[in-house]
Image (cartoon, helix red, strand yellow):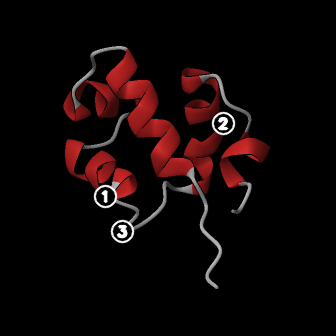
């Protein structure tokens, strides 16, 4: 069974709850909408240096985002 890190789920949930487009969310972090889309689809993960900013923005600890199922 493959473990799954849930960062993409948290990002997508936060973004939709606040009515933000992927472009708007990306602008808050200085990345493209394409990058946000890839994170949400779990094709890749955000750069490690963005984790503190993402954590602060969405209100979820880095530990929680990195917790595997």
Residue 69 screen position, x and y as percent: 69, 62
Q: CA distance from mark 1 to mark 3?
A: 5 Å
Please tell me whether mark 2 or mark 1 is closer to you in this view. Answer: 1
Residue 7 image position (x, y, % from top left): 55, 49
Residue 9 lies, in percent from the top left, at 47, 46
The residue pinned by badge 3 equals 43
Counting residues from the N terminus, which is met first, the one under dot 1 or under dot 3? Answer: 1
Q: Where in the figure is residue 48, as x and y percent of width and height? A: 61, 55
Q: Residue at x 49, y 54 (%)?
A: 46
Describe the element under mark 2 as helix, strand or loop: helix
Are dots 1 and 3 in contact, CB under 8 Å? yes
Q: Residues within 10 Å of mark 1 (few under 14, many from 20)?
A: some
Q: Residues within 10 Å of mark 3 (few under 14, many from 20)?
A: few
Report the side of 21 relative to 57 (left or right). Answer: left
Residue 52 badge? 2
SS at circle 3: loop
Which image quadrant for residue 33? top left
Q: Residue 28: which numbered mark, if any? A: none
Q: In the displayed image of the protein, which residue is found farthest to the right?
A: 63
The answer to the question of whether label 2 and label 1 lie on touching residues, with beta carbons closer than 8 A, is: no
Mark 3 or mark 2: which comes first in sequence?
Answer: 3
> CA separation, marks 2 and 1?
19 Å
Locate the N terminus and report the quarter of the image it occupies: bottom right
Q: Nearer the viewer, mark 3 or mark 2?
A: 3
SS class, disc 1: helix
Q: On the image, numbered disc 1 is attached to which residue? A: 38
Quadrant location of residue 56? top right
Q: Is residue 39 above or below residue 60?
A: below
When the figure is inspected, residue 8 is found, relative to residue 44, above or below; the finding is: above
In front of the other: 32 or 69: 69
């Amino acid at each position: 069974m493959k473990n799954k890190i849930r960062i993409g789920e948290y990002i997508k949930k936060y973004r939709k709850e606040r009515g933000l487009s992927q472009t708007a969310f990306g602008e808050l972090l200085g990345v493209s909408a394409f990058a946000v889309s890839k994170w949400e689809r779990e094709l890749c993960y955000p750069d490690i240096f963005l984790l503190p900013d993402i954590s602060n923005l969405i209100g979820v600890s880095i530990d929680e985002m990195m917790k595997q199922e």
